[in-house]
Image: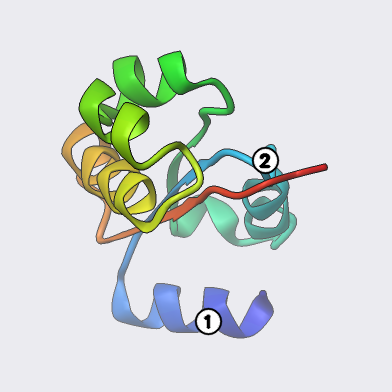
Amino acid sequence: MDRIADILIKQGLTIATAESCTGGLLSSRLTDVSRSSAFVHLNFVTYANEAKNKILGVSLETLEKHGAVSEECAREMAEGLHKVTGADICVSTTGIAG
């Protein structure tokens, strides 16, 4: 993460995360870096479909048609995250946790 931090700080970029199955792990790793306040913008854990829909704007149609564990859902999570945060880099995770 130090290497990522160096790149983000050097280029003046911010990052935001929207996590599902990782439950905040990515956010935790990013904020473990001592200089994280210079690049971490905002992070969400949207484990429930309702949170994906209400916070990130993932469409109910996408969730019903493709499911929460799909490329379509991950894309809409990242796009919604960008709309909410305006961060330069928006990362989303979704998958099966157990």
The amino acid marked with disc number 1 is: Asp
Work out whether residue 70 or residue 1 is closer to the camera in this orientation and state it: 70
Residue 4: where, in percent of width, then height? 55, 79
Location of residue 33 by image quarter: bottom right
Looking at the image, residue 13 lies above or below residue 65: below
Q: Tell me the distance, in whole angstroms, between the alpha carbons under discs 2 and 1.
A: 22 Å
The amino acid marked with disc number 2 is: Gly
Q: Answer yes or no: do the residues labelled 2 and 1 have beta carbons within 8 Å? A: no
Q: Outermost residue toward the front?
A: 65
Work out whether residue 68 or residue 82 is closer to the camera in this orientation and state it: 68
Residue at point 43%, 37% (across, down) = 67
Looking at the image, residue 11 lies above or below residue 89: below
Q: Secondary structure at mark 1?
A: helix
Work out whether mark 2 precedes mark 1 in sequence or the reverse, and give the earlier one: 1
Work out whether residue 30 or residue 47 is closer to the camera in this orientation and state it: 47
Q: How many marks?
A: 2
Number of the label disc, if any, that sits on residue 24: 2
Q: Secondary structure at mark 2?
A: loop
Residue at point 22%, 27% (across, down) = 61
Q: Quarter of the image containing the C terminus?
A: top right
Q: How is the image coloured?
A: rainbow
Residue at point 72%, 48% (across, down) = 25
Looking at the image, residue 60 lies above or below residue 86: above
Comparing labels 2 and 1, the label whose residue is closer to the camera: 2
- Which residue is labeled 1 in the image? 6
Residue at point 46%, 37% (across, down) = 68
Residue 23: where, in percent of width, then height? 69, 37
Q: Residues within 10 Å of mark 2 (few under 14, many from 20)?
A: some
Q: Quarter of the image containing the N terminus?
A: bottom right
Residue 14: where, in percent of width, then height? 35, 59
Q: Residues within 10 Å of mark 1 (few under 14, many from 20)?
A: few
